[in-house]
Amino acid sequence: MQISTQKKRQFFLGMIFSLLCLGGMFWVIKPAEIAQAIQQTDARYLLGTAVYLFIYLFLRAVRWRYLLGNRIPQAKLFHIQNIGQMLTQLLPFRLGDVARGVLVGQQPGLSVTQGVTTMVVERLLDMLLMVLLLPLALLQIETLPGWLRQAALVSGVATVGLSFFLMVVANKRPFAHKMLTWLGDKLTRLASEKVHRQLDHLLDGLTAFTQWRSALVLLGLSLLTWLPVVLAYNAALQAVHLPASLLNATFIMIAGAFAVAAPSSPGQIGVFHMGVIAAMTALGQPAEAAASLAVLYHAINFLLMVLTGLVGVTYVQMSLPHLARLLGFQFETAPPELSGPIS
């Protein structure tokens, strides 16, 4: 496997950023205070957090199967997804996304491009949903500056407009290519045939947006997919004896989701914690309790992803060394790494 200089820089930048976030967290909050807060948690609610996250994984696979045209058994896709999630937690360069695309591409009637394209659409849907929910979540923060409330509201309206635009370009492929050609006249790097092929792949993934019914189904599936995550954060709040509400949990979820979009180490260590702590302190909660929630939630999420991924490897009857060789072969030919909010 050959790793480009750019990816090496991204890896080291992510590691440095994660270390800086961890250092900042422990500079402000003493580890002993975090440990003390963790010792006082209610394990029953932590179990609830794990159960809700497992439901999230299942529903995410349901949505992915719908994007793939229901052409793969649900159980198999569920395990393929979990293998990818596990590798994302353990390996750099978001190789988990590559693994998902490669494994889906080995299924009858599907290709690596289809797998990766639908993952891009997944991330796009997640991002749109987070931006749409943001104004609602910010309503509860009384100390929030007026201009920031206004900006959040404008972003929500803009997201609705973007959603309609996606439906238009999904139905008008020639129009989308004409727009790209026009942009290519302004920006030379957009004028290549490769960019047009990538646009075709994206439009293939947006097929579900060509009809109102399928688009509404996708929106409903996206809301249903992220509801267990809200409930998981709500249970985690109860576990650390903090005020629990669906609005609080939604705001923390959005903060954590956008935080992990930043460069980081595998598993989003540090950046996730700082995102959650920042959100909770904005809600007026003590920093040590916020840190304990971030640590516990991240640990539960990490362990669940790894365990379900190992089960998935057994289910698809593929050894880890074979999977590593497969990834090494596909690494250079796979599309660029995905980015965006994840749980």
Image (spheres, rainbow, N blue to C red):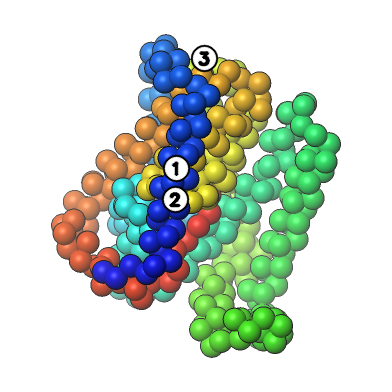
Mark 1: amino acid: Ser
Q: Nearer the viewer, mark 1 or mark 3?
A: 1
Q: Residue at x 50, y 63 (%)?
A: 120
Q: Which residue is mark 2?
A: 14
- Does 87 sit left or right of 234 as displayed? left
Question: Secondary structure under badge 2?
Answer: helix
The alpha-carbon separation of the residues under discs 1 and 3 comes to 27 Å
Residue at 66 percent across and 28 percent down: it is 282
Q: CA distance from mark 1 to mark 2?
A: 6 Å
Asked if marks 2 and 3 touch (Cβ < 8 Å), the reply is: no
Which circle's residue, 2 or 3, is located before the other in the chain? 2
Q: CA distance from mark 2 to mark 3?
A: 32 Å
Mark 3 crowd level (few <14, some 14–19, many ≥20, 10 Å Cα): some
Disc 2 or disc 3, which is closer to the eye?
Answer: 2
Look at the image and tell me whether residue 205 can be seen: yes
In this figure, which residue is indicated by the disc labeled 3?
A: 241
Residue tagged 1? 18
Kindly identify the residue that appears in the image at 48 percent across and 51 percent down.
263
The vertical placement of 85 against 176, above or below, is above
Kindly check if marks 1 and 2 are in contact, taking CB atoms under 8 A apart as contact.
Answer: yes
> Which quadrant holds residue 153?
top right
Q: Callout 1: few (<14), some (14-19), or many (20+) C-alpha neighbours within 10 Å? A: many
Q: Secondary structure at mark 1?
A: helix
Q: Nearer the viewer, residue 67 or 255?
A: 255
Where is residue 172 shown, x and y percent of the image? 67, 80
Q: Which corner quadrant of the image does residue 173 belong to? A: bottom right
